[in-house]
Image (tube, helix red, strand yellow):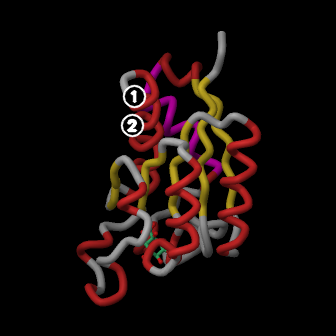
């Protein structure tokens, strides 16, 4: 069975999930994700190979996306953390790379500081945005990317 390879790419301060302000970001860690994907997708999860990666640097996110293209990764779930709101470089990368991408946030960014978090530089380059469901939102985003790839 050929597996669908989905890169779950995380930006700054997301390597410490579970410890970082759990009252805001929840108690799950990135290691919990495969279990949640199985819960959401059932047997279909067996077709998915998750590649989970985190970096605190803006360039590191772009390097990983370029590498994903070389590796033949099929889809991306991207939580760029604070770079969501600032990174033209990341938006430029997504604009050319052509790998279907779903933007995800643990928190509902539209319920937070308007001047800081309501603007996403990367959303126009993504198929859609899932925001506000904690780590469960990542599992929904994996399912959404899988659907996009099956029925583009
Ligand atoms: C976040 C929201 C961002 O505004 C923030 O900078 C993060 C996490 C989220 O998942 O809710 O680091 O992307």
Rendered location of residue 26, percent (x, y): 46, 64
Q: Is mark 1 within 8 Å of ligand 1?
A: no
Magenta span: helix, strand or loop, mainly? helix
Q: Is residue 26 left or right of residue 7?
A: left
For disc 1, the neighbor class at 10 Å (few under 14, some 14 to 19, many from 20) is few
Which image quadrant is residue 56 in? bottom right
Residue depicted at 34% across the width and 55% down the height: 129
* 116 and 62: which is toward the camera: 62
Could you tell me which residue is drawn at 65 percent across and 37 percent down? 73
Which structural element holds mark 1? helix
Instruction: Estimate the x, y position of residue 3 in percent, counting from the top left.
Output: 64, 21
State which region is magenta: 31-42
Mark 2 touches mark 1? (CB < 8 Å): yes
In which quadrant of the rendered image does the N terminus lie? top right
Residue under pointer 2: 144
Secondary element at image label 2: helix
- Where's the C terminus, which quadrant? top left
Above or below residue 100? Residue 16 is below
Please state the horizontal and vertical placement of residue 9, each as a whole percent of the image: 61, 55
| Residue denoted by label 1 | 147
Give the quadrant of residue 24. Answer: bottom left
- Whether the residue carrying mark 2 lies under 8 Å from ligand 1 is answered with no
Q: Disc 2 and disc 1: Cα gap in Å? A: 5 Å
């Amino acid at each position: 069975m050929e597996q669908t390879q989905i890169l779950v790419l995380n930006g700054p301060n997301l390597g410490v999930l579970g410890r970082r302000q759990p009252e805001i970001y929840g108690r799950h860690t990135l290691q919990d994700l495969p279990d949640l994907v199985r819960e959401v997708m059932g047997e279909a999860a067996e077709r998915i190979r998750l590649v989970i990666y985190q970096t605190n640097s803006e360039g590191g996110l772009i390097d990983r996306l370029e590498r994903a293209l070389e590796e033949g990764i099929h889809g991306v779930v991207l939580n760029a953390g604070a770079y969501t709101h600032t990174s033209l470089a990341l938006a430029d990368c997504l604009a050319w790379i052509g790998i279907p991408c779903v933007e995800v946030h643990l928190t509902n960014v539209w319920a937070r500081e308007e001047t800081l978090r309501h603007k996403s530089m990367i959303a126009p380059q993504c198929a859609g945005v899932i925001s506000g469901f904690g780590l469960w939102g990542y599992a929904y985003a994996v399912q959404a990317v899988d659907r996009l790839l099956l029925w583009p």
